[in-house]
Amino acid sequence: MSSIIQSASQELIKPYQANITVPNWMISSMERVMQYYVDKNLRLDTISTDRMPKPVEGKKYMLYAHIPFCHTLCSFCTFHRFLFREDKAREYFIALRKEMQMAKDLGYEFESMYIGGGTTTVLEDELARTIEHAKNLFPGIKEVSCESDPQHLASPEFKQLKGLVDRMSIGVQSFDDGILKMTDRLDKFGSGQETFDRIMAAKELFPIINVDLIFGFKGQTDEIIQSDLDMASKLDPRQITTYPLMITHQTRKSVKGQLAAPHGEMVNQYRQILNSLTGQYNQLSAWAFGKTDNEGFDEYVIDYDEYLGVGSGSFSFLNDTLYVNTFSLKKYQQRIAQGRMAVEQQKKYQLKEVMQYRFLLGMFSGRLSRQYFRDTFNVNLDTALFKEMASMKAMGALKNDPLNPDELIVTDNGKMLGLLMMKEFYSGMDNVRAQLRQPLAETDM
């Protein structure tokens, strides 16, 4: 791609140059601050429960469904998943549909549905049946988002999802065969070129295709990252997501020593991503880019303050309370058979903690609004979160919008810090998942 583009009016338009000036010591300090808050607020000091609350009139909700099966388990993945067994998976989908009915019986309606995993497409016929069931139960669902790995795109059964899924996110991670080999994905999912060809063939099936890339791998040079971005751009997907590699307590040994790049490379790699994609795409969040700025993407928590999760290992956030479903497949089946939803733990958050969480999401999404905090919490953002606001302004992460005093502009420094904070938050959530999975025995499968 040319570094300078000739416009129709013959004016020279310079490429975007990300203005990230945050020094490494400041980034390290912010990481430590985030780790403190994550450890404090994501402790497993939950209390037991066996029921979800009823919906609150006037609130909008999103439905999350978790499919915890994969044909192969990637070493850097920390999501709740088990090795695929068809009999177990078919039983699971049946139970999942029953749990959706229980949510309906409580009075819930949903505007959107997100299906995550695991690999959601391990059984395309069951997935299609489940989406159809959800749309029948909840006719207000306007969009369905789903995830898949590159291998399933080549399956003839994959076409069953056409007309049911509005947004399909493909976990590419990298098109570089060296990175794929290092992460044990080359033999599992094929070469970068094979993945490229499969995505190109599948584009016609869904209104929105999202290409997931990961940066921060060991040996992932500027040239490799640019090649990944160029390959993704050639596909011309509606969305591209560029995740930083996340290191958690459970992956620290396998990822940090063998797969992760030195810590200091993150800023330069992120600058390269911003420079390459800005102009081609609108920025939906610190790491997500889309052709338009009003379409759903992976971080559904930005668009929906409240969501209900169904399935083993899913989370819900309702009325400032985190609800956790059982991570045991055995217990999940037992609960559903007894006519009970899968939730077994809850944790109530205080107002200040919820406001800090919303502040994090505002930084990450670039949608930080004084009006939102007034309407949602009845507070003045500048005084209610004085320390957070003051520190971000001091680091050049935020500035006032001269056209609208209720809005704040998240600068390139802010995008960098928002990415960092969200990375630490998700790593903390992954640590929670690891603790919840730790007691599982073979009989829990």
Image (spheres, rainbow, N blue to C red):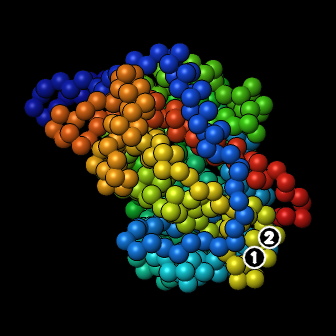
Q: Position of residue 174 (x, y in %)?
A: 58, 38
| Amino acid type indicated by mark 2 | Lys
Is 4 or 299 nearer to us in this picture? 299
Q: Position of residue 253 (x, y in %)?
A: 78, 31
Question: How far apart are labels 1 and 2 at the CA level?
Answer: 6 Å
Mark number, residue 444: none
The picture places residue 204, in percent across and down from the top left corner, at 43, 62
Q: Nearer the viewer, residue 222 or 147?
A: 147
Quadrant of the frame with the N terminus: top left
Nearer-the-camera pick, 280 or 143: 143
Q: Is residue 355 above or below residue 104?
A: above
Residue drawn at x 48%, y 45% is 352
Residue where numbered disc 2 is placed:
331
User: In the shown orientation, is residue 37 left or right of residue 163?
Assistant: right
Which residue, as the protein is rendered here, is positioned at the far left?
9
Which x, y percent locates residue 242? 50, 39
Quadrant placement of the C terminus: bottom right
Q: Secondary structure at mark 1?
A: helix
Residue 222 visible somewhere in the drawing: no
Q: Which residue is mark 1?
A: 335
Left/right placement of residue 399 relative to residue 429 reads left
In the rendered image, the vertical position of residue 291 relative to residue 424, given as above or below? below
Q: Amino acid at mark 1?
A: Arg
